[in-house]
C-alpha cells in the first residue's frame, strides 16, 4: 500500500520543480556573440548589425564582444572552451581556415571543436592598382604585362599570412605570374602606399576602395566571386577572364557555437538566423558594405570549412608562408 505521506511529498517536489524546468527553456538569458577581429572590421560590422535583430527573434539580448589577438586564435579558443549551451556564439571569418596552417599547436581543432550554425554572408574583394604606376587599361592587359615582366610589379597586403596575402599567392600559383609581395602592418597603410605609387596593387574590400577609385587615385581591375557587385557594376570578375578559381577567394562569415551544443539549439538558431538575414533593411545595410546575406544549413558551412582548409593549406605550403 502506498504511504500517502510519501505521495504528497512527491507531488509537492514535482510541482516545485516545474518553475525550474520552465526557466531552462532556451534562451532564458543574454547571449554573447564573440568577434575575434577588431572593431570596425567587416566581421564586426556584420555582428553588430545582426545582433539586435537576432535578439529580437530570441527575445533575449545578444551582446557583441570583441576578443582579438593572434589572428583570431584568442577569441576562437575562448569560444571552443565555453559551455556548449547556446549562450556563447562566434562570428567566424573565412580566415579561420587559414590560421591552422600559419600557427603551430593551435589550442583547438578548427573543425571538431566548433558546431556550425549557418553561413550568413559573403563579400568580394577587388584588385585595385595605382593608375599612374601600373600598366594596362583593363585586367587582361595588366595580366599580360605581369606575365611578360616577372617581378616588375608588386602588391601590398595587410601583413604576412593575412587573407589578401594568401589570395594573391593562390592567384600567382595558379597562373604562374611573378608579382612581388610587400607586407604592411594593416590595410590602411597598404592602401596608402598603393595610392602613393610605392606599390602597384592590392586586394581590398569594395567599400574601402571606392572613395579612392572615384577620386581617380585607384583603378579597379577585377573582382573575386561569381558575379559582379552592385557597388561597382562596371568592374568585371576574375571569372570573366577565365580565372574561375578566384570565385573561392570571397570573404565569408558564419555563425558557430562550441562543439556539442545541443542539436535543438543549433536548429533554433539556424532558423532565426535565416529569418534575420532575410530582412530587407538588413540586406540593404549590408549591401552598402559590399556584403551579401547568404544564410545556409549547418552542413553547408561544414563543407565550406573543410574545402577551404584544404585549399589554403596547399597555398601556405607551396608559398612557404609564415605569419607576422
Image (cartoon, rainbow, N blue to C red):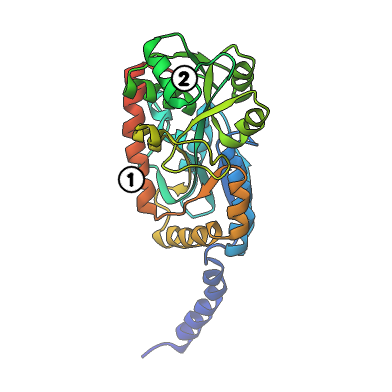
Res 102 visible: yes
Q: Position of residue 82 (x, y in %)?
A: 50, 45
The residue at the point 47 percent across, 36 percent down is 236
Residue 304 left/right relative to 265? left
Q: Quadrant of residue 62?
A: bottom right
The N terminus - image quarter: bottom left
Residue identifier under label 1:
303
Residue identifier under label 2:
323
| Callout 1 secondary element | helix
Question: 102 or 28: which is nearer to us?
Answer: 102
Q: Position of residue 181 (x, y in %)?
A: 47, 14
Alpha carbon separation for disc pair 1 and 2: 25 Å
Residue 193 left/right relative to 310? right
Q: Position of residue 179 (x, y in %)?
A: 43, 14
| Callout 2 secondary element | loop
Disc 1 to disc 2: CB gap under 8 Å: no
Amino acid at each position: 500500500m502506498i504511504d500517502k505521506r510519501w505521495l504528497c511529498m512527491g507531488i509537492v517536489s514535482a510541482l516545485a520543480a516545474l518553475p525550474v524546468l520552465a526557466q531552462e527553456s532556451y534562451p532564458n538569458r543574454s547571449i554573447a556573440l564573440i568577434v575575434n577581429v577588431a572593431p570596425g572590421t567587416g566581421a564586426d560590422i556584420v555582428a553588430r548589425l545582426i545582433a539586435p535583430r537576432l535578439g529580437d527573434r530570441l527575445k533575449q539580448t545578444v551582446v557583441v564582444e570583441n576578443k582579438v589577438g593572434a589572428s583570431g586564435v584568442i577569441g576562437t579558443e575562448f569560444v571552443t572552451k565555453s559551455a556548449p549551451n547556446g549562450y556563447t556564439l562566434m562570428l567566424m571569418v573565412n580566415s579561420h581556415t587559414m590560421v591552422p596552417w600559419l600557427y603551430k599547436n593551435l589550442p583547438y581543432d578548427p573543425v571538431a571543436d566548433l558546431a556550425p550554425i549557418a553561413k550568413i554572408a559573403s563579400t568580394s574583394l577587388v584588385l585595385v592598382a595605382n593608375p599612374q604606376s601600373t600598366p594596362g587599361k583593363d585586367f587582361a592587359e595588366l595580366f599580360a604585362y605581369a606575365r611578360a615582366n616577372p617581378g616588375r610589379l608588386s602588391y601590398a597586403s595587410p601583413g604576412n599570412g593575412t587573407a589578401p596575402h594568401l589570395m594573391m599567392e593562390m592567384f600567382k600559383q595558379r597562373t604562374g605570374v611573378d608579382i612581388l609581395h610587400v607586407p604592411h602592418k594593416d590595410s590602411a597603410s597598404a592602401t596608402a602606399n598603393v595610392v602613393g605609387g610605392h606599390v602597384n596593387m592590392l586586394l581590398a574590400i569594395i567599400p574601402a576602395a571606392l572613395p579612392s577609385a572615384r577620386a581617380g587615385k585607384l583603378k579597379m581591375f577585377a573582382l573575386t566571386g561569381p558575379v559582379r557587385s552592385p557597388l561597382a557594376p562596371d568592374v568585371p570578375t576574375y571569372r570573366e577572364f577565365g580565372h574561375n578559381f578566384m570565385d573561392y577567394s570571397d570573404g565569408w562569415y558564419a555563425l558557430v557555437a562550441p562543439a556539442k551544443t545541443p542539436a535543438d539549439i543549433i536548429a533554433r538558431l539556424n532558423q532565426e538566423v535565416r529569418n534575420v538575414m532575410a530582412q530587407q533593411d538588413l540586406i540593404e545595410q549590408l549591401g552598402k558594405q559590399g556584403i551579401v546575406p547568404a544564410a545556409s544549413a549547418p552542413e553547408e558551412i561544414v563543407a565550406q570549412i573543410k574545402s577551404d582548409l584544404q585549399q589554403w593549406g596547399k597555398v601556405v605550403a607551396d608559398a612557404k608562408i609564415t605569419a607576422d
